[in-house]
């Protein structure tokens, strides 16, 4: 289990929506996918979701599976509609310029048991 | 305790509420006047006249092989065919409904096809009844009367037939085709309701994902429909009803990876063909019924205390 903050720092990710106490959230697993149907099959709790999808349904899906936070990979900018939806839902949302594979490798190393 | 459902803005939604959990077999006429293939058009005309009916099925043993309507009789009268056997002038390939189908399927069928009655068959394809718009109207009026009676005797609280005193949450959502923006509203509300009642996170997640999959199915694959959520102390019951187009091959739709989604739906991140199998995997009880051109009904039940199977009450 890791705190969310060092994971976000490692990705050089910038906040789109960072509700109070986001950095203290615990992350038990990482899940990366661009298919909502796959995300809905993801098991586990306290997940950090990595995706390059930009539709509002990504946030809905994250909420439905109880994800702790979402990182949009390979993104310099985020649509305003998405940042508004994240604020409304109160879900931590970040974006990183790193592509998905690099992001996964980076987080994979951090999540490995010491 | 749930609040009673408010009068819906939309009449069709209100009618769907009234139809509730009724099935075709609950409202159809079971006494059917039928003829065999050896009967003549004259025999049918006599049966119609003496019983004041407008249509007679033609049977081979217990199976329906055709249908004679008043129109067919008038035609035979005009053409001098009254002594001909019914098989010569009957309508074949008759559209039937199944007695196990939800009443909403019959309502869709009447609005989509020009027929005034549908023969009803059981799972063995044997004729068991006939359904007309009159049957449907009577069933809806009966349910309305029951609700009015409850208002008069219990001081204004309507308890729909689908609910009981154990009901914690009950709501019907109207869902429009391709309205991805609204997708997930019902599951978000279900999640909140369950969280507020301290339900285990794993159970909440199963119910919320099953609900979300069914919402998205109506949005992406149907012409629109309703999603009903009912929660009591033991279970969450989610029922999705849509107005079509229906699923021709349910086994195929239930297999992982099969999808009819368009490129546009896929561009929204959906359409991997996992929705129905995933819903079934997450459900403690799962039922699907579909009629081509009539609609699809999916019911998913998630137990709140999985170690104790709930009693059959209010199922």
Image (cartoon, coloured by chain):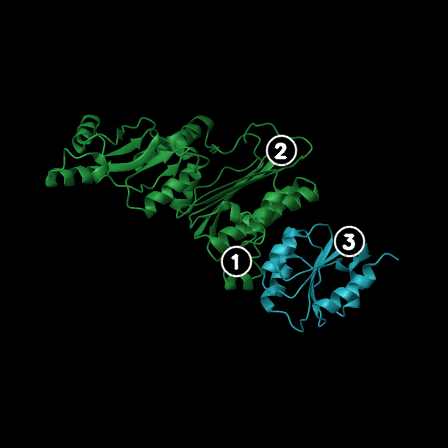
Q: Are marks 3 and 1 on the same chain?
A: no
Residue B234's tag is 2
Q: Position of residue A67 (x, y in %)?
A: 69, 54
Instruction: From this view, report whether residue A10 is shown above or below residue B183.
Output: below
SS at mark 1 in the image: helix
State the residue in front, B243 or B64: B64
Q: Position of residue B213 (x, y in %)?
A: 57, 50
**Is residue B189 visible to the viewer in this orientation of the structure?**
no
Mark 1 or mark 2: which comes first in sequence? 1
Name the residue beneath numbered marker 1.
B180
Label 2 crowd (10 A; few <14 / some 14-19 / many >=20): some
Tell me if B243 is positioned left or right of B82 in this view: right
Label 1 crowd (10 A; few <14 / some 14-19 / many >=20): some
**Is residue A5 visible to the viewer in this orientation of the structure?**
yes
Tell me if B132 is positioned left or right of B282 in this view: left
Q: Are marks 1 and 2 on the same chain?
A: yes
Q: Quadrant of residue B54?
A: top left
Q: Are marks 3 and 2 on the same chain?
A: no
**Label 3–label 2 contact, CB within 8 A:** no
Mark 3, chain letter? A
Between circles 3 and 2, the one closer to the viewer is: 3
> Chain B appears in which tint?
green
Q: Residue at x 43, y 38 (%)?
A: B102
Name the residue beneath numbered marker 3.
A28
Q: Quadrant of residue B22?
A: top left
Mark 1, chain letter? B
Q: Residue at x 42, y 49 (%)?
A: B244
Distance of mark 3 from mark 1, alpha carbons?
Answer: 30 Å
């Amino acid at each position: 289990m890791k705190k969310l903050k060092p994971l976000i720092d490692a990705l050089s990710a910038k906040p789109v929506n960072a509700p109070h106490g986001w950095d203290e959230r615990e992350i038990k697993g990482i899940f990366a996918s661009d298919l909502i149907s796959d995300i809905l099959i993801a098991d586990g709790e306290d997940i950090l979701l990595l995706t390059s999808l930009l539709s509002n349904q990504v946030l809905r899906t994250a909420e439905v599976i109880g994800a702790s936070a979402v990182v949009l990979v390979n993104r310099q900018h985020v649509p305003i509609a998405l940042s508004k939806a994240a604020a409304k839902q109160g879900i931590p949302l970040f974006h990183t310029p790193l592509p998905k594979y690099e992001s996964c490798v980076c987080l994979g190393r951090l999540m490995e048991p010491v | 305790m749930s609040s009673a459902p408010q009068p819906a803005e939309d009449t069709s939604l209100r009618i769907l509420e009234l139809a509730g959990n009724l099935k075709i077999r609950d409202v159809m006429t079971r006494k059917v006047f039928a003829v065999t293939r050896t009967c003549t058009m004259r025999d049918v005309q006599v049966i119609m006249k003496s019983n004041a009916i407008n249509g007679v099925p033609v049977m081979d043993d217990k199976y329906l092989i055709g249908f004679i309507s008043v129109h067919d009789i008038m035609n035979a009268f005009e053409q001098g065919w009254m002594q001909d056997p019914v098989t010569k002038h009957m309508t074949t390939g008759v559209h039937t409904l199944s007695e196990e189908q939800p009443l909403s399927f019959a309502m869709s069928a009447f609005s989509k096809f020009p027929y005034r009655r549908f023969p009803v068959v059981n799972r063995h394809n044997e004729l068991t009844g006939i359904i007309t718009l009159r049957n449907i109207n009577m069933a809806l009026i009966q349910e309305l009367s029951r609700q009015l009676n409850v208002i008069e005797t219990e001081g204004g609280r309507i308890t729909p037939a689908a609910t009981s005193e154990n009901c914690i949450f009950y709501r019907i959502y109207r869902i429009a085709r391709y309205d991805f923006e609204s997708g997930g509203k019902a599951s978000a509300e279900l999640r909140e309701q369950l969280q507020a009642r301290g339900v285990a996170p794993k159970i909440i997640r199963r119910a919320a994902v099953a609900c979300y999959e069914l919402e998205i199915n109506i949005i992406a694959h149907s012409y629109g429909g309703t999603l009903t959520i009912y929660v009591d102390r033991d279970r969450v019951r989610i029922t999705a009803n849509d107005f079509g187009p229906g699923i021709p091959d349910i086994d195929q739709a239930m297999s992982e990876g099969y999808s009819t989604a368009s490129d546009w739906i896929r561009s929204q991140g959906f359409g991997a063909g996992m929705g129905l199998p995933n819903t079934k995997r997450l459900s403690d009880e799962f039922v699907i019924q579909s009629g081509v051109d009539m609609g699809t009904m999916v019911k998913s039940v998630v137990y709140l205390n999985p170690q104790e199977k709930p009693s059959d009450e209010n199922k």
